[in-house]
Amino acid sequence: MKSPRRVRWVEWALLAAALAIPPINWFWMRMDPAGAHDFVGPLRQVLIYAVLALGLNIVTGFTGLLHLGMAAFMAVGAYAYGILTCEIYPFQLSFWPALGASALIGTVAGLLLGAPTMALRGDYLAIVTLGFGEIVQDVLKNLDDITQGTQGINPLPGPVVPGYAFNSQNAMPWYYLYLGILVLVVVGCRNLEWSRPGRAWLAIRVDELAARCMGIPVVRQKMLAFAAGAALAAIAGAMMASMLTSTGEPANYDFQVSILALCIVIVGGMGSITGVLVGAVAMIGFANVLLPMLAGQLQARGLVSQANVFGNPNNWKYLIFGLVLVLMMRFRPQGLLPRAGAARAAGKSP
Amino acid sequence: MSALLSVQGLRARYGAVEALREVSLEVRAGEIVTLIGANGAGKSTTLMCLSRVKSIAAGEITFEGRSLNEVPAHRVVGLGLAQVPEGRRIFPRLTVFENLEMGAYLRRDRDGVAKDRAHVYDLFPVLRERSRQAGGTLSGGEQQMLAIGRALMSRPRLLMMDEPSMGIAPILVARIFDAVKRLKNEGMTILLVEQNARAALRLADRGYVIETGRIVLSDRAPALLENPRVQEAYLGE
């Protein structure tokens, strides 16, 4: 099964837009230094959330396991990156080894949670992952000898690339680096989709009994999906920690983050890699880039005072999110760009 | 001839309910054996136990001289025991071709897989015509053919079929049973579970009758067809 031409076209268009945005933003800031808004910095969050949601897409989209605790694995990645790089700890690794180690630690955490729970099905697994998400937050908060409690671990170093030093004043190099990481993740997910594990995941999602009859080791393949998802979440966490130069407080990795990742996957289209990318652009781009930009512009032009609660677009975020989700589920439940074959199943022509 | 599959004193339960009380049977290489019985007698449970999808409470399952009692479900297929599950359970969104590929999940010999696919297409030409069509768009009978083909793709030495005639147009049932006969002539060993006792006994070499989880009768198939007890209970005479 190959992705239809339409989907590939969307993917290339997204990449072209992603490459073109920073120069456009730079040009805008040169032309109108007072009124322009830097949106390249916030856009990095779209890239990070895309990695997180692609991880969830392996678990929920490919394999059909409802996972409500992705934020916990993001936290594992962020704190692993923090402990491995921060100067107050003995390890003091640099960006790339720490990123790899975070992914590895995330994988191990995924396997540790997966081993006792993979025999569970449906709602039960969802509840266990939900509980795990809460536990991880509490552990990070209370284990303050190691995790610095609610202060978070900081300062953390940025990426290292030969011949260039990253600094938090200039977001553009981070943006391109993170875009590169995302492209690698997308290529990896594409290859996974129709690999042997990918086909096993599909069979398990559609019909677990039939999958067993094919000789597919169901529990082992579910664990593999779980571990792969956890690894990507941990990478997203490490990217976030490096970008913020801090792990932030444990509450930054709460249930809302897990739900946001799930919404990205559902809005984009379960199991559709391109869909998840579109979902990340739509949801995070809207909430973290578009709304703050709008708020800034309104205030800068004196149209709305800072004291006006209703006039601040940021405060409308969750109302709009909720409305969009309700409308989506009513009129386009398969997501913006559903997985190839979903139309076939609905009896429409491909 | 020694038995390919031998089952001794098999017992299984769903919670407190005993589904199988005493199932002993034997399948020898190259024969078609049928297990007939009423709804809920334990036919499907027996197959589920044999493919190790269902756990067993007691008894001994031996396949090619090797005990299957401790073998997990996903290893059974690799050992040469394939099951066509009840209700077909094909993958509706995948094409016919992809469904067959799924059946060959454990295999890495591409040439062998291609050869077996050609054999399946040969057995059921309609599958070749529809190879690029989604499995869910096939008729019930064609889906059953696909389910059988998918099981054959693992190149089993024993093929277990659960109610292949269920809910299928009579003309397609005849075609499926013809294919089963042809498989036997090619040397395949088949364990066939059926509610349609007459058709199954006409096709089979030997048969077992199961009632409330117990094998109550076993004989050569033609003899079972003549047996008054079978005639009364299962053949409606």
Image: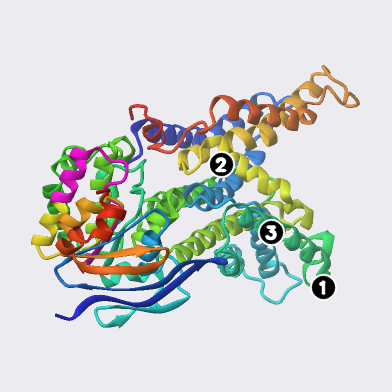
- The local secondary structure at tag 2 comes to helix
> Does the magenta run of residues contain B158?
yes
Depth check: give the residue in front, B114 or A2.
B114
Q: Look at 54% across and 52% down and name the residue there.
A: A65
Q: Amino acid at mark 1?
A: Asp
Which dot, 3 or 2, sits closer to the camera?
2
Which dot, 2 or 1, sits closer to the camera?
2
Depth check: give the residue in front, A277 or A270.
A270
> Does the magenta run of residues contain B73?
no
Q: Which residues are magenta?
A: B156-178
Q: Is residue A343 left or right of residue A177?
A: left
Q: Amino acid at mark 3?
A: Ala
Q: Look at 38% across and 55% down and name the residue there.
A: A210
**Marked residue nearer the N-terminal end (2 or 1):** 1
Quadrant of the image occupied by residue B54? bottom left
Residue holding disc 2: A265
Tell me the subunit letter for badge 1. A
Q: Is residue A144 above or below residue A268?
A: below
Residue holding disc 1: A145
Residue holding disc 3: A75
- The local secondary structure at tag 1 comes to helix
The answer for how far apart the CA atoms under marks 3 and 1 are is: 17 Å
Q: Look at 61% across and 31% down and name the residue there.
A: A25
In which quadrant is the N terminus of chain B drawn? bottom left
Residue B168, position as x, y percentages in the image: 27, 40
Depth check: give the residue in front, A71 or A77.
A71
